[in-house]
Image (tube, rainbow, N blue to C red):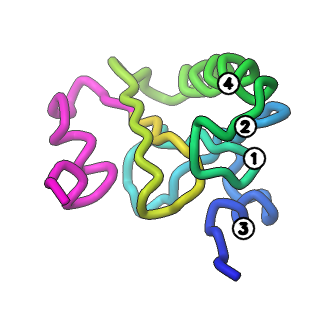
Amino acid sequence: MITCPICNAHKLREGIIVESEHWIVRKAPDEKNLEGYCYLESKSHTESWFSLSMEACKDFGNILHLGLAASLTLPESPEKIYFTCISEAVPHLHMHMVPRYKHHEKGISHLEKALGPGFSKPL
């Protein structure tokens, strides 16, 4: 049996900022060193948007709103919040919500700093 780190974090209730019926917004680990960086994760273990229930799809807008509202309570409001969904390294449907502040560079290079080297390199 494969152990899913996202499912394990949900069981342990690690870093949860806000949640809805089908989704969790969870704080990224401190070693990411980026204030406000968080994950938006499906509560059910699924690897594909296509396998979500209609209820989970409808609930997505609610959790997105709650997650963005939570980011407004940060000490400094981000200029932008970048979203990316890859779900390759960890096969559990999740999105990265990466804030970009005034002092950060823009674009893919900022995402690469948050997500790690190799993010923007072709496979």
Secondary structure, mark 2, is strand
Tell me the amino acid under the disc marked 4.
Answer: Phe
Tell me the amino acid under the disc marked 2.
Answer: Trp
Up-down relation of residue 9 to residue 40 (above or below) = below
> Residue 44: where, in percent of width, then height?
76, 49
Q: Which residue position holds label 2? A: 23
Residue plotted at (55% across, 45% down)? 94
Q: Which residue is the extreme one toward the right?
A: 21
Cα distance between the residues tagged 4 and 2: 7 Å
State which region is magenta. 99-123
Of badges 3 and 4, nearer the viewer stands 4
Q: Which residue position holds label 4? A: 60
In the image, which disc is placed on residue 26? none
Q: Residues within 10 Å of mark 4 (few under 14, many from 20)?
A: many
Instruction: Check contact, mark 3 vs mark 4: CB within 8 A.
Output: no
Q: Residues within 10 Å of mark 1 (few under 14, many from 20)?
A: many
Choose the circle earlier in sequence order: 1 or 3: 3
Instruction: Check contact, mark 1 vs mark 3: CB within 8 A.
Output: no
Cα distance between the residues tagged 3 and 2: 15 Å
Instruction: Check contact, mark 4 vs mark 1: CB within 8 A.
Output: no
Residue 88 picture quarter = bottom left
Residue 52 picture quarter = top right
> Residue 109: where, in percent of width, then height?
16, 41
Q: Residues within 10 Å of mark 3 (few under 14, many from 20)?
A: few
Residue 32 within the segment the image draws in magenta = no
Secondary structure, mark 3, is helix
Q: What is the magenta segment's predominant secondary structure?
A: loop
Q: Name the image quarter holding the C terminus.
A: bottom left
Residue 102 within the segment the image draws in magenta = yes
Instruction: Check contact, mark 1 vs mark 2: CB within 8 A.
Output: yes
Tell me the amino acid under the disc marked 1.
Answer: Lys
